[in-house]
Image (cartoon, helix red, strand yellow):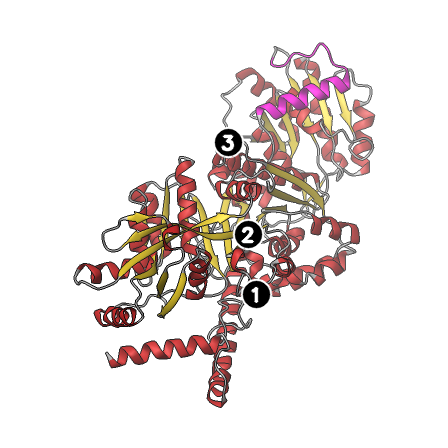
Amino acid sequence: MAPKRITENFKKYYIDLVKDRRKGAAAALFCFFLLLFSFIYGFLVRLILFCYGIKLFKSYKPDCRVISVGNIAWGGTGKTPLVEALVRFLKQEGRNPAILIRGYGKDEVYMLKDKFKDVPVLAGRDRIKTAADALRRYCADTVILDDGFQHWRMGRDLDIVLIDSQLPFGNRRLIPRGILREPLSSLKRADVFLLTRRDLAKEGIEPLKKELRRYNRNAPVYEAMHLPCSLRSLPCGEKTEPSAIKNQRIAVLAGIENPRSFTGTLSLLGAEVSLKFYFCDHHRYSKKDLKTIERLCLENRIETVITTEKDAARLIPLLESGRYKFKILALGIELKIAGDEQEKSFYSLVSGKSSKRPYSILILSDGKAGHLNQSKALAGIIQKRKLGQGARDARVDTKIVEVKFRNGFCRLLLNLGSVFSAPACRSCLACLRFCLKKDSFRELMETPANVIVSAGSSLSSVNLFLSYKNSARNVVLMRPSFLGLGRFDLVIAPEHDRIKPRDNVLLTRIAPNIIDRQYLQEQANILKEKLHITDYTLHNDNPTIGVLIGGDTAEYRLTRELINKVISRLKVAADNLNCRLLISTSRRTPKAVEGLLKENFADFPRCKLLLIANEKNIPEAVGGILGLSDIILVSGESISMVSEAVSAEKYTLVFNPQKRTRASTKQERFLEKLEKEGLLKVVQPDGLLSEIKNLWKEKPCKKKIQDKEALYRG
């Protein structure tokens, strides 16, 4: 017993040191060494957080809703009463929750299992494993992560951080010199703050709220009280009202992190606390402890001892095996959110139904229509999946912000600087402020986001910095420049980019786009109205040919000679098949090619639409042409245009502009793969006429590409 007593006394001495209750030279020396270890601990914590921030360490998110209940300081904030309140609420909502707990001391495990017979309580150090068990064995749809704020490996939907109103941060030192588990800057990860024991706080809590807003402006702050709900006789379990101890002389028995708050609750009930038996958290009681308590109670003529429900789990086996000359009662505590409106708001966040904080998707635009359409397509898939997972009244907001750099040098500078970025950059963002134009930077700072989507390598660095700032998930389309793939939650890239498959990489055959049947119908109707077409019949004996012409790129050049051949074959095909032509250029189309098209088709009777994008841009042009056409002819240098044509499920013909290099290009690999799958046909200008005739005569079965389904699953 002597070693146990020494250990107990040392723990008490250490706690007094940490809470600055000990004075003297020995205490000062000990505190100095503890402070040195705090610096080492702080360095390691920041290093680990940095590794998670740059995706060097991976986190795992179970396929269900995950709610984390935790704190930034060690113990004593009332996590267990909140877990109980969450379980009761979720059960009322018809959910199937599971509790994941580390199980240190096992008293909380026994207590939760005793209270919730039909809720799985899974204990273990490996929360990833216990989460998988909860889904596989118990079909849980919501996982409550007890003491989970520091469990960085587990992704979560809601991070609730509890803060004790009486002693929020101690001496503001990291352990072992203080009570902080992480630097206070980590409070930026919180989704919700809950200030507990507000009724016991000696000073007002407004200064604490103000400080929390300095670290995290977005997280709402709620207040809670710990209210006594029952008194249970041990070991028989007979219940009485808490008011039964009013005006009684009692003893307090507590082996929890914050016994003084428990004593304060008893005083508020009107009890006269005459003896206090405080032990360390998770103390293992012995018969000798109870005999000592019995002796002191008899000496002071005290008949009733009040303990906590957590201590009751450790006391019951001893009480069942022996008889003692005092009555011991366990006080049940429940957590109550202060204010009816605040309580309703808090639990709406828990259920995922809150209308005050909609799920936000931020799309970054570089001004290129093709990149923006890809991002909008992906945002639509994310929105569809999010609404499918949530409740009927769930909201998903999407906002598009154009990113404007000061100049090309600033774009390059930001890309290079992002290589050395880390989550700690969220508190600065000076490099982002320096490299972007003021109006663009201001709009990005004012836009909240849960997911940030961008397309093109030039925006990958901006995406990364904003994900730090918003603690958001980042998704990029195409290979990010300079930055490794591991810095992003999801990289969506076409197969022809030759990126090796990884956990966070999703390979697609075509570029994501917004093309579907409903979109094509809407765009076609708008285009017909703008062009005043009233006698337009689709899929009759006379086909409509849509022509999408791109322009020059680093690998390809659109020459007059090539376009002349295409024009001559198109005019012959239009006359022979009595078909209509709908033609649109892009902003990349050379002036010479635009002039050639106007010269040949401006007065051509079978050309119902000739749109020169650099002169007049109709937003519905591409979608309308795809919707109104039976056959699509598209230049092959633009992967985006080809992808949209294939997604429209129309007969697609592709002609290649003149190559600038002998090396194989990604466009060639892209077209070759799609042609093998029968999704398009690559043609030479000389053979264009015969291909159009054969295609319309044979009318082969059209194939549908399944990329959107793969993106939805990813």
Residue range of the region highlighted in magenta in the rendering: 517-539
Q: How far is the residue under mark 3 from the one under mark 1? A: 49 Å
27 is higher (above) or lower (below) than 419: below
Q: Secondary structure at mark 3?
A: loop
Name the amino acid, label 3: Ile
Please tell me whether the stretch drawn in magenta is mainly helix, strand or loop: helix
What crowding class fits label 1: few (fewer than 14 Cα within 10 Å), some (14-19), or many (20 or more)? some
Q: How far is the residue under mark 1 from the one under mark 2? A: 19 Å
Please give the residue where the numbered disc 1 appears in the rendered image.
184
What crowding class fits label 2: few (fewer than 14 Cα within 10 Å), some (14-19), or many (20 or more)? many
Name the amino acid, label 2: Glu
- Which percent across, then down, holds residue 313? 28, 58
Whether 526 is among the magenta residues is yes
Q: Which mark is residue 223?
A: 2
679 vs 566, left or right, is left
Identify which residue, 228 or 156, lies in the foreground.
228
Q: Quadrant of residue 427?
A: bottom right
- Closest to the camera, between mark 1 and mark 2, is 2
Identify which residue, 161 or 49, lies in the foreground.
161
What crowding class fits label 3: few (fewer than 14 Cα within 10 Å), some (14-19), or many (20 or more)? some
- Mark before the other along the chain sequence, 2 or 3: 2
- Closest to the camera, between mark 2 and mark 3, is 2
Q: Which mark is residue 705?
A: 3
Say which quadrant the N terminus sits in: bottom left
Q: Are marks 1 and 2 in contact (CB under 8 Å)?
A: no
Name the amino acid, label 1: Leu
110 vs 222, left or right, is left
Q: Secondary structure at mark 1?
A: helix
